[in-house]
């Protein structure tokens, strides 16, 4: 390092390389290689062995997480792993619990729910908003999601403001169609 007045001039020769930290040895006795790869000691996955590549491959080939578990314990472990160890419910369980109104009896048809009242052909739908929405979408009961979507798309194309050139009456009709569609889809969902 040379000094010139107040400034200090550094040269590359004065820069020193720090020695590399010592490498961890392989945990297999007598192996001269560095232990760069970790492998779990047990199922807790808290403690690890450190092996070289050759020995970690051997260890992993022999490693069996389920070695000391019964078949029932393995099944339970796999079931817990599907939801990352968090509680889950069977499909349709919450729908069948009676938490949702089902004026059209669709829950009974879709899920075979015995608690839902069966639809009767002679009893009309009494909800006036639902009846009006079906009339706007030109539908008849019983309602089908596919038919609702088909009619909505057909009527929306006819009354959409972009296709009508700004006709205010058709724009209001489009708003009514959209609101009717939302109401019916809420009931059917």
Image (cartoon, helix red, strand yellow):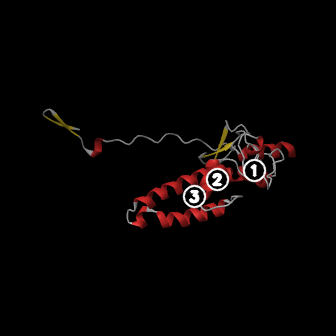
Q: Quadrant of residue 41?
A: top right
**Tag 1, which secondary structure?**
helix
Q: At 46% from the left edge and 63% from the top edge, which residue is drawn?
A: 160
Instruction: Count residues near mark 1 (Cα–Cα under 10 Å), then give few for <14, some for 14-19, many for 20+.
Output: many
Q: Dot 3 lies on which element?
A: helix
- Identify residue for label 3: 136
Q: Which mark is residue 10?
A: none
**Residue 170 appears in the figure:** yes
Of label 2 and label 3, which has the lower sequence position? 2
Q: Nearer the viewer, residue 110 or 85?
A: 110
Q: Is mark 2 in CB contact (under 8 Å) with mark 3?
A: no
Q: Residue furthest top?
A: 6
Which label belongs to residue 107? Answer: 1
In this view of the protein, can residue 69 be seen by the observer? no
* Residue 171 position within the rendered picture, expressed as x and y whole percent measured from the top left: 44, 58
Q: CA distance from mark 2 to mark 1?
A: 19 Å
Q: Is residue 55 left or right of residue 151?
A: right
Q: Is residue 5 left or right of residue 175?
A: left
168 shown above or below 25: below
Tell me which label, 1 or 3, sits earlier in the chain. 1
First of labels 2, 1 by sequence position:
1
Q: Residue furthest left?
A: 5
Mark 2 lies on residue: 131
Identify the residue shown where x is 29% and y is 41%: 14
Residue contact at pointers 1 and 3, CB within 8 angstroms: no
Give the CA separation, mark 1 to mark 3. 24 Å
């Amino acid at each position: 390092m040379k000094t010139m007045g107040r400034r200090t001039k550094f040269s590359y020769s004065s820069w020193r390389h720090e020695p590399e930290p010592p490498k961890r040895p392989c945990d297999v006795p007598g192996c001269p290689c560095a232990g760069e790869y970790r492998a779990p000691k047990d199922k807790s996955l808290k403690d690890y062995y450190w092996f070289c590549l050759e020995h970690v491959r051997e260890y992993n080939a022999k490693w069996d997480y389920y070695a000391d578990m019964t078949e029932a314990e393995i099944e339970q472990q796999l079931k817990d792993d599907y939801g990352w160890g968090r509680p889950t419910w069977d499909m349709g369980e919450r729908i069948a619990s009676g938490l949702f109104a089902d004026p059209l009896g669709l829950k009974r048809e879709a899920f075979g729910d015995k608690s839902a009242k069966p639809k009767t052909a002679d009893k009309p739908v009494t909800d006036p908003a639902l009846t009006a929405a079906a009339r706007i979408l030109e539908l008849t009961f019983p309602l089908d999601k596919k038919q609702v979507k088909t009619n909505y798309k057909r009527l929306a194309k006819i009354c959409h403001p972009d296709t009508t050139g700004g006709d205010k009456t058709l724009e209001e009709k489009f708003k009514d169609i959209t609101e009717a569609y939302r109401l019916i889809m809420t009931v059917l969902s």
